[in-house]
Each structure stands twice: as C-alpha cells, then as structure tokens.
Image (cartoon, grey):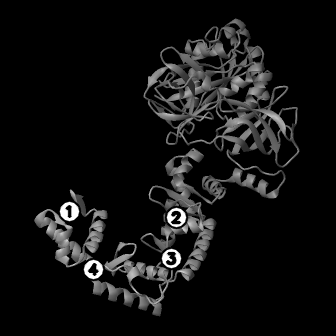
Amino acid sequence: MTHWTVGTAGHIDHGKTALIKALTGRDTDRLEEEKKRGITIDLGFTYFDLPGGDRVGIIDVPGHERFIGNMLAGVSGIDLVLLVIAADEGVMPQTAEHVEILEQLGVTRGLIVLSKCDLVDRQLRDLVTEDVRQRLNGSCFANAPMAYVSAVTGEGIPDLAILMERLLRQGPLFRNVSTFPRLFIDRIFQKKGLGTIAAGTLLSGEIAREDRLFLYPQMLPCRIRGVQVHGQEMEKASAGQRTAVNLPDIVCSQIRRGTVIAREGALRNARLLDVRIHMCRHTKRRLLNRTRLHLYIGAAKLLCRAVLMDTEELAAGESGYAQLILEEDLAVLKGDRFILRFYSPLETFGGGEILDPNPVKKHRYRPKDLEEFRREEAADFPQEILMYIQKQPHGFIVKQELAAVFGADESSIAYAAAVLEKEEHLVSLQGKTKTFLYERERYEEQISRTEAYLSRFHKERPYRWGIGKAQLRTGCDPWMTQEFCDAFCQTASDQGRLQTGAQLVRLKNYQVPCDGTYQKVTDILFENLTAGGMDFVRLRDMDFGGIAEQTVLDICADELLKGKLYKLTQDCYTLAELYEDACAKISALLRQNGKITVTELRDLFGTNRRSIRILLEDLDSRGITRKDGKESERVSAL
C-alpha cells in the first residue's frame, strides 16, 4: 500500500472541510471554536482509501486570512493540492493568496475542485469555470484538471477520488528514505497513558519505534516509543507519510509547532540564512532593505529581518539575494522553501529558497559576496560540497559528516566526492576511523608548510631519521588531530611527497649523513657494547670525545631503525643479535623449569644482577614474562 499526503487550499467557507468529510466520512474541525464559528481555524487531519487501495492522508487547512500561518504549517511535504473554489463565488482573495503561496513553496501538482455545485445551474457553473481558468492562467494551476462536486448531494465525489488517484500515480514525487529522518512537527497534544504525541509529514528518511533522535532547535534528545501512520500503529514510517510519534520523555511545553525531529548532529541551528527572495506577482507593497518580517518555513513561524544584498527594494514579480537575520534559532537545509509576510499589517508578499543554511555574514553590494551567492545558487551537488569545504577554517571536513550537513545519503556523498577528486578539487585522506576531504589548494599549502618545517628540523637534527608525527603536529600545525596528521602524512607518502616510517616523517629525498661524526659515534658505541656483552653499558659511561649528547642519541635511534641495536632503557642499548639470543635462552629455560630467577639468569649469562633486572623489566613490559611471588622470580606471560 502506498501512502500519500494531500492538502487543501482555498478561500474561507468555500467548502474544504465539508469536501473532506464527504470523501472520508470524518469531520476535521476538532476545536469547539471551529464548530461554533463554522470555519477551520487550525489544521485538521484525516485519511481515506482510494479505489485502488492506496491510503491518502488529508490535511485540512484554514482559509481565513487571519489563520494563514496555520495554513502554511500544513502544506510542507504534500503530494497533491486540492484548490477548492465555491461555484457560487468563484476566485476570492484567499484563493489567490493560497495559489501564490503554493507557487512559492514549489508545489507543482494540483487539482481544482469546484465545490457547492448544487447551488448553481449548469450555465453559471460554466461561466465560473471560464473565470477560474482566466484568473489562474500563468499560475501553477493553469493546466490543472478540474472536478465538480457537491458535499451536500455527493455529486462528483466518487469521480474526484478516481481523479486524485490518477494524478497521484502519474509519477510519485521523489522521497529520499535513505537519508536521515526529518519530521516538521505541526501538531502536538497530550494523551493519557502515553504522554506527548507529535505529528507532521515525514519529509525524508524513516522513523522507527525505539529510535533515539533529536529535537531542533531545542537540542533535546528524544526516544520514539510508538509510531502511527494515518492512525495505524506501525513499526516505522517512511518519507512522505503523515506520521505521529509518541515522545514519552518530552513534555508538551518543551516543544512547539515547527520543531524538527531528526538524527542527532544531522542539523545545525542558525540565526542567519542566505536566500533568494521571490516577490509575488500581485503584491502591491515593496520590500525595503532591513524590513522586519514573518518567516514561515516547514511548520515554523518566526520573526526575521531581510538584508537585501544587491538592491534597495524589491517590487512585485522581482527577485533578489538576501540574508535573513533570525530572531530565534532555526534548523533547516539548503533548498528548503519558505514564505515571507510583512510584520504589520500581515500580508503575504513573497517567498523563496535557502541557498546556505549556515553562512557567514556578507556585505551588501560587495562583488565577492554577490559572486558567492551566485555560486551557491548555481552549484550542483559536488560544487555545493566543495564550497562548504572551502568555508571550513582549515579547508577540510570529515566525509562522514557531510550526509548530516546536506541531508544526503552516503552513496550520493561518495559519488560527489569521487567527482571532486577526479577533477582535482579535493584530496581524500584515509584515517583509521575517518575519511578527511581536503581542498586541493589547502592540501598543497599544507605540504609546503610541512616541507619547510621538516627542512628546518633536518638542519637542526641531521642524524635523526625524521621527526615524530606527534611533534610535527604540535610544532607545525597544532590544530591537527593525531588521526588527521597520520592520514595526511600517509597520503603525502603514498604520493611520493614525503617519507614515513613507524611514527616518523621526513622529506622525500632526505638521507642521514654517514659522515665522520656518525662513523665515530657508531665505532665507539659498538666497541663498548661488544666488549660489555651482557654487562650492559650505559651511554653515559661511554666517552664520545665531546660529541653532543643529542647527536649521540639521534645516531643511536638511526641504528635502532636499521635493526642493529635494541633499546632497553632511555640510556641503555645492547646489540640486537645479543638481545635476541638472550630472549631465546630465557624462553627455553621457562619451558623447561616453568620459572626463572634473577640469580639463575645472572649465572647463565655470567653478568651482574643490575643488567639482569634491566633485561627482565624489558621482558615484563613486552608481555613475555611477569612477576610471580618474589620480586626476583618470573614466569612466562605468554
């Protein structure tokens, strides 16, 4: 069964609620004031099954101009709009306003319903039909099919259901279920025994029972205890479905209409938006720079101020770039549509779409900033990602975070990143747990800084194979995390730009000079270690003829990397072959006796207790032996 969401639009008292009752058998006016006054004030919801078995959720929106805000909360995420026009009145002010609102929100699929046909004869109905077609010419309803109904007599209701089904199946709207869920809450209520219930149309992704999600902009974690779709208990709801969720850990006062349910980290709150504003064709007022406005987006309503970037004012039918300065936090995505109304008197004058949901402040008329607006608007998905990365402080982002930033599935992110790498706009750095996407230009700058830093290091420490990655990170670019530094060095090494070894890195062509100083240190070192044997000789007890201690340590470290030495302590080395032979003899003794002592090893190797203790402490640290009882006894730790 396919689930659809249909919304109504139209002037007050043109029969929207009566039409829905005729289709579904249910009254969507739920408030006492609504029943008393005979008009819909707030959103109403119900559903019915089409002849083919698909289920349609219907949102009944208010038509009165005082309740346009409530109407706007209900039109996000709908598949089809029923524009209801009374046959005895024709197109009225709220009809025209609703049509312009729907156009601003990007609604493309509509059906004109001429209601109250029992009140007019055929001749008048034909005249009204012709007038409606003329008045809606050039709008999104210009070529929409028209149905003739009477909620009182039932005339045309079955045919309307068939026509709705045909339109809905002409080509379903794209619903991305593979990305994260995003549910704009437009209705909140308390239910005894369950707690808070929040409902809205699920715009993307899926929501399942026991999901752990997040409320924006309140930044509150929430648990989904139950899920309903069109009044039926479900294990999960999918994009496009009218969805109600039970939030047992949230009280009604913590959330409001317009709150968004999404995955934690999927959205970011904003107080500034880059947008393009489109003025309605028939508005009589002009929008001036820095005008205070009502912003409607999703199911949210808040105040903002519009800073026009490339003009002083906008008139009917015009459009322009702007930054909206918000008076409250808001969590939205690029491409979301919105409606704008003047602060006072309330009047819908336009709308638009978000170009950047988390921009930096821009300057009016500045060419660089206007060019960025144009790039934001014209960018395809890979370019959007590149622009976002370019705005980051250090020119990179974790690839896994992009799905949350752009509301896209992982396959789309992977494809876009591959395109950008192929075009040499990005370099991919693979870390242990994260993939970093680095802008190519910033990556090249980082390579240059690293080469310069390594060049200075090699001059200061010529006998050192390379610098430790941790030291490189803190000395060259302290903002780096260790994982990013490791990934950067490995990528540069794979490209032949740097050399890496163990936890060290150096210039690609650098070699430790085997000069006179190097030869003198190694001669003295190996002479002492060979003569000492298992009587380990400390570096401090060797005479290197005035050669600096750091130089000696660096040469020892280089010989260690070559595999000729083994480091027992900071000041004590031995020959690698001698150490391996000692380990083999100790292992054999442990297999034979199960236990060894300091005295036994002293006698075995003909050395002193100090050297044996150094050796055993090294074996303990490597997990080969461990203490057992007395300080001087060891057993196998393997």
Residue closest to the far left: 592
Query: How many neighbours does mark 4 have within 10 angstroms: few (below 14), some (14-19), or many (20 or more)?
Result: some
SS for callout 2: helix
Which residue occupies the foreground of this view, 33 or 583?
583
Disc 1 from disc 2: Cα separation: 43 Å
Q: Earlier in the sequence, mark 2 or mark 3?
A: 2
SS for callout 3: strand
Query: Residue at left 80%, top 35%?
Result: 280
Query: How many neighbours does mark 2 have within 10 angstroms: few (below 14), some (14-19), or many (20 or more)?
Result: many
Query: How many neighbours does mark 1 have within 10 angstroms: few (below 14), some (14-19), or many (20 or more)?
Result: some
Q: Does residue 292 show up?
A: yes
Pointer 3: what residue? 506
Q: Earlier in the sequence, mark 2 or mark 4?
A: 2
Pointer 2: what residue? 485
For badge 1, the amino acid type reads Glu
The answer to whether the residues at label 1 and label 2 have Cβ atoms under 8 Å apart is no
Q: Earlier in the sequence, mark 1 or mark 2?
A: 2
Q: Does residue 142 show up?
A: no
Pointer 4: what residue? 535
Which residue occupies the foreground of this view, 602 or 358?
602
The answer to whether the residues at label 2 and label 4 have Cβ atoms under 8 Å apart is no
SS for callout 4: loop
Query: Residue at left 63%, top 67%?
Result: 441
